[in-house]
Image (cartoon, rainbow, N blue to C red):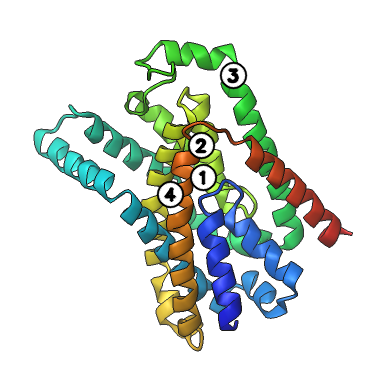
Amino acid sequence: MDYSQAIILGLIQGVTELFPVSSLGHSVILPAFFGWTSVVAAQSAPESFFLAFLVGLHVATALALAVFYRDQWIRIVGGLLRSLRRRRIELPEERLGWLLVVASVPAGVVGILLEHPLRVLFATPVAAAGFLVINGCILLAGERFRRRAAVRSVVAAHEQTPSGDRQLDTLEFREAGVVGVAQVFALLAGISRSGITMVAGLIRGLDHEDAARFSFLLATPIILAAGVYKLPDLLGPNGEGVRGQVLAGSVAAAVAAYASVRFLSRYFTSRTLTPFAIYSLVIGALALLRFGL
């Protein structure tokens, strides 16, 4: 991997990790499209320099999210500590903190057990393209289901925002667990972590802004933990000869992730997942034609 490839992949990671179009899917499809044969081979290898590269990108993306949401994270962490001391939950930020904890458990456990074998098994352009098409269908289904009466009845049973949607801190813990389980499917290249968790939130009556905020807050500890867990790959033999490229790609990923979350946090105040669904369907179909024939 040369420096230009590292920077391009870092930018792709930073954008597509937060845009609901799957960072892993793009990192599999685009190197194959560009003819980067060494990168393509490394992605599906049990051990390779690409593992070390992903560590840097994950940590950089998580740090960018943490910086953007730093004020909220200070309140959330403080709320968690207060609730532990009092042994009860009283304030909204305390409840939000525990909702994030509950939602993080499924992806954390499954990620430790299955992330590596799933990446090796499905890190092919054809598989990623197929899952990207499925991702588009999931986003469209989420928008369609959100407008149904069943979702409106969920909203009616809880405290609402001025727009008539459900407030984020009224989610029940079992519902947060469902969002966490949905996040597990993002281990498949082509399924977007932010997209599928947003859909899970929309189905439970959240508006797009709160669904996106919960998704981005939830992504921060999960992505950071994934990077830290695999830190030995970067410090060990897999990282030899590519640590400079890892640094360059990580800086690019951090800048792109910060710009992306800043844009999306405003975008979802008034807009939907539909454009990203169409993008996923079109790009996935084109990639299937390109690599599947």
Q: Earlier in the sequence, mark 4 or mark 2?
A: 2
Q: Are marks 1 and 4 in contact (CB under 8 Å)?
A: no
Give the label on residue 86, or none. Answer: none
Mark 4 or 3: the one toward you? 4
Query: Residue, x 78% and y 56% (percent of image)?
Result: 287
Measured as percent of width and height from the top left, residue 25 is found at 64, 57
Mark 1 or 4: the one toward you? 4
Q: Are marks 2 and 1 in contact (CB under 8 Å)?
A: yes
According to the picture, the residue beneath numbered tag 2 turns out to be 198
Q: Are marks 3 and 2 in contact (CB under 8 Å)?
A: no
Query: Residue, x 38% and y 52% (percent of image)?
Result: 220
Residue 99 in view here: yes
Q: Between 279 and 51, which is closer to the camera in this rendering?
A: 279
Q: Quadrant of residue 23?
A: bottom right
Dividing the image into 4 quarters, which one contains the N terminus? bottom right
Q: Residues within 10 Å of mark 1 (few under 14, many from 20)?
A: many
Q: Earlier in the sequence, mark 1 or mark 4?
A: 1
Distance (Cα) linking label 4 and label 3: 27 Å
Mark 2 residue type = Met
Measured as percent of width and height from the top left, residue 130 is found at 74, 50
Query: Residue, x 32% and y 27% (percent of image)?
Result: 169
Q: Earlier in the sequence, mark 3 or mark 1?
A: 3
According to the picture, the residue beneath numbered tag 4 turns out to be 262
Query: Residue, x 36% and y 60% (percent of image)?
Result: 63
According to the picture, the residue beneath numbered tag 3 turns out to be 147
Distance (Cα) linking label 4 and label 2: 17 Å
Residue 58 in view here: no
Q: Are marks 4 and 2 in contact (CB under 8 Å)?
A: no
Give the label on residue 194, or none. Answer: 1
Measured as percent of width and height from the top left, residue 284 is found at 75, 50
Mark 4 residue type = Arg
